[in-house]
Amino acid sequence: MSEPNFFLFYVRDLNTSCEFYEQIFERPLQRSSDHFAMLKFSNINFGLWTAQQVDPTLDAPGGSAEMVITLTSIAEVDQLYQQWVEKGITIAQQPAKLSFGYSFVVTDPDGHFLRIMA
């Protein structure tokens, strides 16, 4: 069976979202049109698509999806949390031990959750 290798977040303002993701991932996004940009990781592609251009028309608000980034230790989670606080990234949840692990959550400009966990 094939494995997922690409996911999209629908965004209101592509330029704002590109700036946000370039800042947190510290690498440039590749733009292929005025309404779409993509970031390549080793095993997955992450795309940003201007919501007004999605076909078929969508009715889902931002924040209806979550990206999870798994790190190897609590210390790494705390270190990244501090770096993102210093960059002014919006924190939705402070670092906390939850039933599935230690994590914190930030939001992007459209309200999508990015959960960092160990």
Image: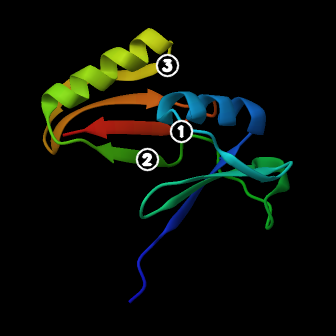
Of residue 87 and residue 30, the one placed in the foreground of this image is: 30
- Of the image marks 3 and 2, the number of the one nearer the N terminus: 2
Q: CA distance from mark 3 to mark 1?
A: 13 Å
Residue 101 x, y percent position in the rendering: 15, 40
Q: Position of residue 7 (x, y in %)?
A: 54, 60
Question: Mark 1 and mark 2 in contact (Cβ < 8 Å)?
Answer: yes
| Residue 111 higher or lower than 89, as above or below | below
**Residue assigned mark 2:** 67
Determine if residue 13 is in view.
no
Element type where label 1 sits in the image: loop
Residue 70 percent across, percent down from the top left: 27, 45
- Say few, some or many: other residues with alpha carbon within 10 Å of mark 1 (under 14 / 14 to 19 / 20 or more): many
From the viewer's perspective, is the residue at label 2 or at label 1 nearer? Answer: 2
Taking the spot 53% from the left edge, 47% from the top edge, the residue there is: 64
Query: Which residue is tagged 3?
Result: 89
Q: Residue at x 26, y 21 (%)?
A: 79
**Which secondary structure, mark 3?**
loop
Which mark is nearer the camera, 3 or 1?
3
**Quick check: 58 above or below 101?**
below
Within-10-Å neighbours for mark 3: few <14, some 14–19, many 20+: some
In depth, the one of 14 and 52 nearer the eye is 14
Tag 3: amino acid: Ile
Amino acid at circle 1? His
* Left or right, residue 73 beside residue 56: left
Q: Which residue is mark 1?
A: 112
- Whole-angstrom CA distance, mark 3 to mark 2, is 15 Å
Q: Nearer the viewer, residue 81 or 9?
A: 81
